[in-house]
Image (spheres, rainbow, N blue to C red):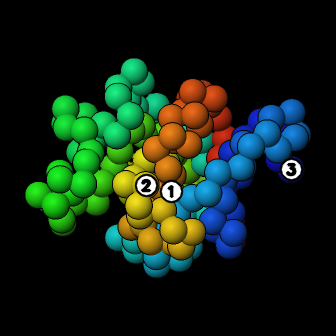
Amino acid sequence: MFPDSHLDICLATQQLTLIQNGQALTTYPISTAKNGAGELMGSGCTPRGWHSIRAKIGARLPLYSVFKARRATSEIYSPELAAQYPERDWILTRILWLGGLEPHKNRYGQVDTTWRYIYLHGCPDELMNGQPESHGCIRLYNADMLNLFNRVSVGMRVFSHE
């Protein structure tokens, strides 16, 4: 049974849908894990099941703000910055940090989504090509991430499925 308002993440279609009052309000293209679906720590997979937004990070920062370890670096992403640091896994604009709600599936121990540091976040827009290519997180275009961030609240439920 789905709550009246939640985010629906479909790994098969690489889409995130904002559902409010049982109606799909908007859909965003996403990029999930190149390693597919899975819950195990260190797997590089996107976890499935019910989650909630445990923290919203980056309010009022500029578009394309760069984050490391959930902290803004004061850098603004650009192709020049990307060329300087080609090894970085870019986390940009905003972060919605997820926490699993299902004990021993995506919460606690080696399957805990929070301690796997699974986020919804912006990434370089040129990396968004409709394919699963992340290290486990859910990537969005930066403008979409900003729009979504402003429409959700801490505690909102998130359902991820294949």
What is the quadrant of residue 162 in the picture?
Answer: bottom right
Name the residue at the bottom extreme: 35
Q: CA distance from mark 3 to mark 2?
A: 34 Å
User: Mark 1 near mark 3, Cβ–Cβ under 8 Å?
Assistant: no
Q: Which residue is mark 3?
A: 1
Mark 1 or mark 3: which is in front? 1
Residue 13 shows in the view = yes
Residue 19 falls left or right of residue 140? right
Residue 40 visible to the viewer:
no
Q: Amino acid at mark 1?
A: Ile
Spatial separation of the CA atoms under disc 1 and disc 2: 13 Å
Disc 3 marks a residue whose amino acid type is Met
Along the line of sight, the residue nearer the viewer: 134 or 100: 134
- Asked whether 25 or 68 is in front, the reply is 25
For label 1, the residue is: 138
Tag 3 secondary structure: loop
- Amino acid type at image mark 2: Asp
Q: Where, by quadrant of the figure, is residue 30 drawn?
A: bottom right
Tell me which corner region of the image, top left, top right, bottom left or bottom right, holds residue 102.
bottom right
The secondary structure type at the circle numbered 2 is helix
- Classify mark 2: residues with Cα within 10 Å, few (<14), some (14-19) or many (20+): some
Residue positioned most to the top: 60
Does label 3 or label 2 sit earlier along the sequence? 3
**Above-or-below relation of 100 to 89:** above
Residue 79 x, y percent position in the rendering = 24, 54
Dot 1: element: strand
- Residue of label 2: 125
Q: Nearer the viewer, residue 20 or 92?
A: 92
Q: Residue at x 17, y 51 (%)?
A: 81
> Residue 119 in the image: x percent, y percent?
45, 49
The picture places residue 59, in percent across and down from the top left corner, at 42, 24
